[in-house]
Image (cartoon, helix red, strand yellow):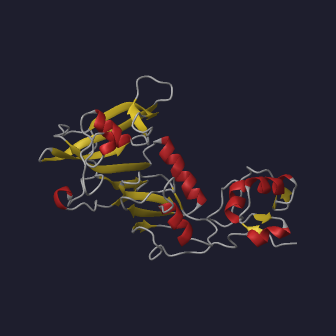
């Protein structure tokens, strides 16, 4: 009989099926069969696929399962030098990366390189591969929160979904036009994804009362006007796809480099950067890497978006 697997602190809280999927290169159907037939047990007892595993639980698996196991034990892997973006901060629970423009958070059609795949390579052999808690568009740069344990990923994902102020994200963006909002202004829209006539591409639009629309809300303030363009600070209150780009474009202030939503072309790419991230009492910041006329040399003060 094979030795049981002991649940590490990084893995605790997962559903049993998730735990097994991370540990073994087997199809979901095979894992379900192991559980259904009693070949998987927690602390000697029979279990169901969606029971949660806890710290130091002993998971018994079939003797032949060890041949395809992906991880025998948790191990620490230094972030530096692993092909990952610069880490702004690291704690026992999270890593805060400064993602460069052009790097997707997840792999997709036409690209395999992503932050997620780089994390999988950097932490190969670890019991729990750190996972992004939220996402940034491929061409958006800036702060990205990654959970080092399942409990951290779940806690922070829930906080983001609740929009309870425990996790706050602020962005800097250059937009076309002279933005008049010297004081914070709240923008509210209903957004929906639509397939456009432009080669059948999907685009987010401000809705007209359709059932699939979702509320979108942000606060924006103009920090500077320079030669027909404006530097704005944005705080998200919801997390809709392309939200900042669409809501500002709808008011006549499309982002520089955002051709998809009416912005002017820019050789340096999209001018949108996640500049500040507050997680509980911890605040992380990173100035955008922009140069030339787009350079930002100082962080906007915390509280600049308070009424």
Q: Quadrant of residue 89?
A: bottom left
Return the residue found at the far top.
209
263 is higher (above) or lower (below) than 94: above
Indicate left or right for 252 with 215 as reference: left
Location of residue 129 in the rendering, given as x and y in whole percent from the top left corner: 58, 65
Q: Nearer the viewer, residue 248 or 139?
A: 139
Indicate left or right for 80 with 42 as reference: left
Kindly identify the residue that appears in the image at 43 percent across and 42 percent down. 241
Kindly identify the residue that appears in the image at 61 percent across and 71 percent down. 126
Location of residue 273 in the rendering, given as x and y in whole percent from the top left corner: 32, 54
225 is higher (above) or lower (below) than 200: below
Q: Nearer the viewer, residue 137 or 38?
A: 137
Indicate left or right for 36 with 238 as reference: right
Number of numbered markers:
0
Q: Quadrant of residue 17?
A: bottom right
- Location of the C terminus by quadrant is top left
14 is higher (above) or lower (below) than 217: below
Kindly identify the residue that appears in the image at 82 percent across and 59 percent down. 40
243 is higher (above) or lower (below) than 72: above
Location of residue 253 in the rendering, given as x and y in whole percent from the top left corner: 24, 39
């Amino acid at each position: 009989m094979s030795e049981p697997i002991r649940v590490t602190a990084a893995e605790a809280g997962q559903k049993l099926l998730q735990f097994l999927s991370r540990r073994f290169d087997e199809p979901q159907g095979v894992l379900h069969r192991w559980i259904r037939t009693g070949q998987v047990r927690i602390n000697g007892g029979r279990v169901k696929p969606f029971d949660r595993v806890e710290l130091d639980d002993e998971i018994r698996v079939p003797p032949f399962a060890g041949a395809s196991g992906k991880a025998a034990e948790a191990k620490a892997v230094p972030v530096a030098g692993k092909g990952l973006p610069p880490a702004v901060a690291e704690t026992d629970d999270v890593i805060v990366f400064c993602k460069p423009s052009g790097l997707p958070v997840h792999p997709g059609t036409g690209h395999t390189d992503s932050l997620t795949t780089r994390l999988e390579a950097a932490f190969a052999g670890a019991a729990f591969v750190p996972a992004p808690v939220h996402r940034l568009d491929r061409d958006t740069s800036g702060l990205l929160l990654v959970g080092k344990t399942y409990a951290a990923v779940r806690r922070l994902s829930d906080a983001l979904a609740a929009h309870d102020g425990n996790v706050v994200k602020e962005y800097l963006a250059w937009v076309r036009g002279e933005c008049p909002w010297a004081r914070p202004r709240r923008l509210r829209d209903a957004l929906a994804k639509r397939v456009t006539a432009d080669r059948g591409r999907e685009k987010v639009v401000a809705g007209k009362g359709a059932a699939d629309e979702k509320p979108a809300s942000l606060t924006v303030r103009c920090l500077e006007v320079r030669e027909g363009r404006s530097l704005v600070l944005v705080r998200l209150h919801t997390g809709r796809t392309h939200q900042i780009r669409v809501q500002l474009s709808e008011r006549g202030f499309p982002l520089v480099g955002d051709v998809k939503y009416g912005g002017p072309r820019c050789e340096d790419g999209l001018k949108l950067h996640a500049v500040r991230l507050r997680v509980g009492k911890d605040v992380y910041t990173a100035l955008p890497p922009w140069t030339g006329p787009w350079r930002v040399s100082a962080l906007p003060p915390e509280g600049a978006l308070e009424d």
